[in-house]
Amino acid sequence: MFDSGDTAWILTSTALVLLMTMPGLALFYAGLVRSRNILSVLMHCSAICCVSSVLWFALGYSLAFTEGGAYIGSLSNIFLLDMARDAATGTIPESVFFSFQMTFAVITPALIVGAYVERIKFGAVLLFSSLWLLLVYVPVCHWVWGGGWLADMGVMDFAGGIVVHVTAGISALVIAIVLGNRSKFPDQISPPHAPWMVMVGAAMLWIGWFGFNAGSALSAGSDAGMAMLVTHLSAATASLVWLTIEWIRFGKPSLIGLVTGTIAGLATVTPASGFIGPIGGLICGLVGGGVCYYCVDLIKVRFNIDDSLDVFAVHGVGGATGTLLIAFLALESMSGVGLEEGVSSISQLKTQIIGIGSVLVWSIAVTLAIIYITRRLVGLRVESEDELEGLDYKAHGETGYNL
């Protein structure tokens, strides 16, 4: 019933994806903020990891992956009460599939942390993230991966361009707008306090992303191998694109810019990784690196929105871009797996647009409702004095550096 090779690979992938949040994303974000807020960011990522794991076990997995309706699953497997020890999902134990999917449920709300750093109440982080996981992530996960209406329509999303990056990206933009800009943004915001930490976190994300994308094949075969290859090509290419743009524009390439390009390339290739060939990985990196760079400037400079660590511009835009590119890069002529019989690139593109658009609308509407509930119950933004002094000591009674 079980394939030991497949099981071993998904066990490894599960550990790799958890590494992306703990400590990869945590260090990536922590290095980007000011030194007086490093612990608050680490606390946000750590606490979200814990609460998301418990909620996924209690409700999320059942609602996402059990048979139900077109829009949500059933409650038949809450607390895994309906899962036998030897239950299988394909060629792997269901317990392994559950754990792998749990790591996705952990990192997705954690991505949103980058939009509200340095100015949000810790209680708001916990309540918002909990409600968001159950009301935004879980339904969309069911729509695309759990046999819901977008799956029936033929939406292609191999590892989470829509499910992970579009949901988190658009919700991050919404909460950044509602929460408001940090004090003295943008002119007097200090630069990242530890670029070396950002690079270390990005490296962990890059390595962990192999489990994210190649693990989504749910087997240790050729699909996993190709997904890993195109993931690396896209990340490397987008890094060089970002570096080159900065070098031409400012005369000096920055480490922060290089690794931000890395994440943009990884986010862009995520939905396409199991459907495309090597040339597709290169194109994802070229397009994703350029488009995401432009959107960072658009959001922060032109629209003056303090999406502090560029969650929407990098993850949301990158995930949506890769989702659209699938319609062309998956073609056999591009060394992809090909589209379904009778489906053209244009018709698949329309399907992909419907998928992105519907999830975008759902994410905006539900996120606004969650923000309203959170604000009424625990409040949203810290006092200006707390923001000025930093959240490490004011919210958690600790400091990141005892010098």
Image (cartoon, helix red, strand yellow):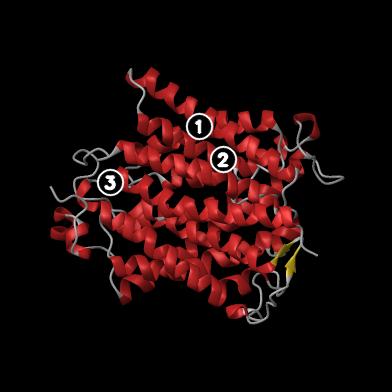
Tell me: residue 20, above or below residue 229.
Answer: below
Q: Is residue 16 visible?
A: yes
Dot placed on the residue nearer the N-terminal end, 3 or 2? 3
**Mark 3 residue element:** loop
The residue that disc 3 covers is 33
**Callout 3 environment at 10 Å: few (<14), some (14 to 19), or many (20+)?**
many
Residue 18 lies left or right of residue 335; in this view the side is left
Q: Which amino acid does the dot numbered 3 rest on?
A: Val
Q: Which amino acid does the dot numbered 2 rest on?
A: Thr
Residue 74 lies left or right of residue 368; in this view the side is right
Residue drawn at x 54%, y 40% is 266
**Callout 1 environment at 10 Å: few (<14), some (14 to 19), or many (20+)?**
many
Q: Which amino acid does the dot numbered 1 rest on?
A: Gly
Badge 2 vs badge 1, beta-carbon distance below 8 Å: yes
**Real-space Cα separation, disc 2 to disc 1, in angstroms:** 8 Å
**Real-space Cα separation, disc 3 to disc 2, in angstroms:** 24 Å
**Mark 2 residue element:** helix
In the image as oriented, which residue stretches furthest toward the right?
Answer: 341
Point out residue 83 in the picture as x, y percentages from the top left corner.
Answer: 68, 77
> Which label was assigned to residue 268?
2
Point out residue 317 in the picture as x, y percentages from the top left corner.
Answer: 51, 43
